[in-house]
Amino acid sequence: MKKCLIAALLGATFASTALAQTSVQIYGIADAGVMWQKGGPTKIYSGGADGSRLGLRGSEDLGNGYKAIFNLEARVELDTGSQQPTLMNDNPGRYLLRGMERIPVAIRDRLQAAIQPPGGPAVNQEKALFDRTSMVGLITPIGAVLLGRMYTPGYEVFNMADAFESGTAGTWGHVTGGTAGFTALGADIRSQEAIQYRIALPNGLGGSVMYGARNSGYLGRYNKFRAGAVTYKANGFDVGVGYNHGYDQQNRPSLRTLTVGGSYALGESWKFFAGFHSQRNENSALIPDYLNGWDQAVAPALTAQGIPLPNQLALRGIFANAISANTKQDANSYQVGVHYKIGNGRVVASYAHQNDRTASNSDANLYALGYNYYLSKRTDLYTALAFIKNDNEAQYSPGTSGNPGGFTEAPGADGRALQLGIRHRF
């Protein structure tokens, strides 16, 4: 989610108009650049500061304070023309294979490729056409009711607090993935199969509640999903509190996040950011996917090698127990940052810390500096420099808005990246 999208959506839905007619708008963002990274290839990417996209949104004024709206937004990868971005590098994440030393090395290598395929899609695995947003709703005098695939209340607050606005190599989210690296999401960005109620009051207070049915959540793996947020947008403040809570296929508590923070604009030049993010996950909704990876990629190879079935089941049991332990999350994170406008540009700086509370204590510190130069209201050039100090088994690596960073070359190795890009809004 980007602030320009949220502002446009809320503006289209809550602003009053005297025109009783249907309006449909085609819009989008074309964003691409190049990234140099330590331990990874120099890469041309799509979606550095904002995810590249093509969208349709529309509204019809029904009178008496009622309005019908819709929004369809498709992901576009300018570097490949596809809709499935990959990780910024192909380094393997080692954390998920912890505790599997009793499984032969050749099998672990096959397993690594099965659960983290090099060059495989990191986002939009379902190949959905309107992966970013697909929503229809009704605005009423007492709020809006929306249905479809939408940004979650908790993630909207996370974005409000991120000095890099969920984009470039400096974004806070690069160190809030699953334990030790991008092994899972650190927050549900969107939820499909969802219904949401939103309200914005004249005094700046606002709120939202969301419920997701079966197959909800970012990847559609939840049995149910609940979320809510309270916000305040006035007098220079853009702050909020957001909570997301998913339940796995067995209806057990899965990823839970609490986010508090936002920004404060001081005059025309300064804007300050601060945020706190807590993430807990005792029952990852991705475990069935990992077990399916074993059954499809490893089990046939064991059978071909003549491994007896009891031995195969014993090895699978080792894998199942280890992957359950390795997908647990328990971390607190915070970020502070600042914008400073100067001439036709702005300087962006931030610091973020991920405090891993699991036994591995795989903390990470992110230092980032960026600059935007605005050629016009629609087009800007940007650059960002990011440094991640990883501890113990952490392998966090800088990414972009559209591409997760992936992993450093080895656990505990530092992640570094420099990127240059251009963004055009239309």
Image (tube, rainbow, N blue to C red):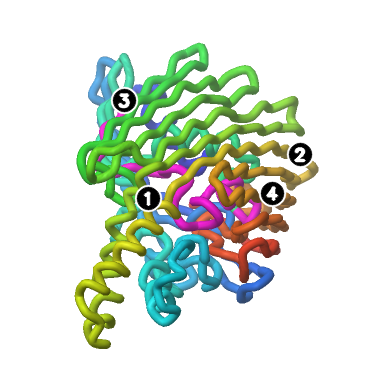
N-terminal of the pair, mark 1 or mark 2, is 1
N-terminal of the pair, mark 3 or mark 4, is 3
The image position of residue 92, as x and y in percent, is 51, 70
Residue at x-position 55% and y-position 55%:
180
| Image vertical order of residue 224 relative to residue 377, above or below | above
As measured in the structure, the alpha-carbon distance from the residue carrying label 1 to the one carrying label 3 is 19 Å
Q: Quadrant of residue 119?
A: bottom left
Q: Please, what is the three-letter code of the amino acid marked with disc 1? A: Arg
| Image vertical order of residue 128 relative to residue 43, above or below | above
As measured in the structure, the alpha-carbon distance from the residue carrying label 3 to the one carrying label 4 is 36 Å
Residue at x-position 45% and y-position 54%:
326
* Residue 422 badge: none
Per the image, the residue denoted by label 2 is 340
**Tag 2 and tag 4, C-beta contact below 8 Å:** no
Q: Secondary structure at mark 3?
A: strand
The residue stretch that appears in magenta: 168-196
Residue furthest out toward the bottom: 305
